[in-house]
Image (spheres, grey):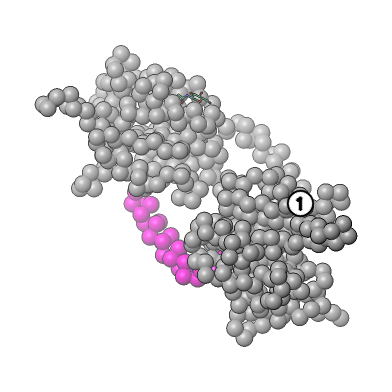
Amino acid sequence: MKLTVFLSGFLLLFLLPNWTKSVDVVDINTLARIINFFEQNYKRVDEDGHPRQYAIAINVPKDQCQNGFIPDQNKFLAQENALNVKNAITDETNGLYQGAELIAAGLRKVEISRKNKHYRHSESLLLHPTDNSPMTKLLNKTKDGCSVFYTFDSPCVDSCLNAKREHSIINALEKWKEHDGIKAFVFKNFWKFDIGKDLQNNFTQIAARIPLYRCKIVVFFTVFLLLFLLSDWTESVEGDKVDINTLARIINFIEQNYKRVNEVDKHPRQYATAINVPNNQCRPNFIPDQNNFLTQENAANVKNAITDETNALYQGAELIAAGTRKVVISKKKQYNMHSESLLLNPADNSPMTKLLNKRKDGCSVFYSFESPCVDTCLDATGKHSILKALENWKEHSGIKAFVFKNFWKFDTKKDLQTKFKQIVAHVPLYRCVSDNECYACNGEGNTPIDTHCLPPPEN
Ligand SMILES: *[C@@H]1O[C@H](CO)[C@@H](O)[C@H](O)[C@H]1NC(C)=O
Ligand SMILES: *[C@@H]1O[C@H](CO)[C@@H](O)[C@H](O)[C@H]1NC(C)=O
């Protein structure tokens, strides 16, 4: 563990200068994946399925435009509902969607009189009026994000790019230029009436203000790949088990970020956490990092909360955590409530119950630094037993895992073979000892608990 920490610090030094250089420019491969994501999720089509003009703008954390980022539905624009976006931009009476990190527009039909109507272009819907447009508001939300504007057809030269016209986007581009962070103006096709014009000259109206890109998408290839990926994915759904390597990374992430240590001597102290995250985050190849995993929790807040022995409990959006709580009965009498019990009791209305309720089919992982103590936690008749809570947890859909790292020091000579089977009767049990070493304890039915999950026999 110490070695890992040291190494990350070392790596950071090398990465920083590199990062500073690339900060202002989108990574071209990541951009291709982002545009492909738009086309897969939000593309506007007519009733025959033919694509129609639409435009989209996003303002997302900068790292999502940098080298190596792979957008997917769980970590990219996760606050937007694709169906809502498509419905909004297809409805020509308004044609506009304004979400948290994304705005989008189709065409808006404007009826001047019964016989006279015109259409407002999607670029204009997003970028007008310059000082108070959907784009202005979007950019205002994250001052140094990565902002990408994508239009399916290139902006029309005669009105959009003509500074003298009412629907010109030039002033908006001028204003956007002032925004910090990464910027990209992207189109796919040429607007059909502009082919043959002097685009070499006309597009400099854009490029002089915002970096301009064209992304063409090889849709066939994507569809092809998707077929392979889908069958792979379906297979792992059936298993309904956490991927053991991903689990090792998750537990390592928890240890790196939330581990409770003694304030004085820095020795690790017992703590427990539970998470309820999208199922794919427990499947093969998911690599948790601070930008894609438990992003709503602040590690310092978690650590402070679980270290404070008067309460010792943290309850966040996707994570709950506990240290030990000191309960004073009288001046001479006090006891410690264990972290497992703090999270799991009372069984019908515990922090765990509430966490599981938030995502009915999520992947739920309970991690305890030390194995649950035999005498209170695993004593079915005791007041602090966790067994009833495990029975409730069993009813939760989705992937489940109960994980521990060390053996509780007073239990190493007890009959853990028998005791741990009480856990396995409800949820799968694992032991994780490092970032690449986890064991399934098994023990279902009449099978024994795996020896990796038991203290070494005394010699
Ligand atoms: C931008 O945000 C500031 C506060 O950060 C607010 O005062 C201002 O009204 C916002 N402007 C727009 C156009 O939303
Ligand atoms: C587009 O280019 C043509 C030819 O260079 C030029 O006459 C015209 O003014 C340009 N239009 C815009 C809007 O830049």
Q: Nearer the viewer, residue 138 or 188?
A: 138
Left or right: 284, with 312 as reference point: left
Quarter placement of the C terminus? bottom right
Task: Give x and y (percent) for residue 148.
Answer: 44, 33
Residue 371 sits above or below residue 18 on the image: below
Quarter placement of the N terminus? bottom right
Instruction: For mark 1, give the secondary structure.
Output: loop
- Which quadrant holds residue 52? top left
Q: Write the residue at 37% across / 52% down.
A: 221
Q: Which residues are magenta?
A: 219-246
Residue 95 sits above or below residue 268 on the image: above
Residue 327 sits above or below residue 182 on the image: below
Residue 421, magenta (yes or no): no
Q: Which residue is mark 1?
A: 310
Check the image and name the residue furthest to the right. 332
Residue 242, magenta (yes or no): yes
Task: Give x and y (percent) for residue 28.
Answer: 48, 38
Magenta portion: prevailing SS class: helix
Q: Is residue 440 visible?
A: no
Q: Write the residue at 29% across / 17% down.
A: 166
Q: Write the residue at 45% across / 38% down.
A: 100
Task: Give x and y (percent) for residue 14.
Answer: 69, 39
- Which quadrant holds residue 366? bottom right
Left or right: 366, with 328 as reference point: left
Left or right: 394, with 106 as reference point: right
Query: Which amino acid type is shown beneath numbered disc 1?
Result: Thr
Query: Mark 1 vs ligand 1: CB under 8 Å?
Result: no
Q: Nearer the viewer, residue 152 or 102?
A: 102
How many other residues sit within 10 Å of disc 1, few (<14), some (14-19) or many (≥20)? few
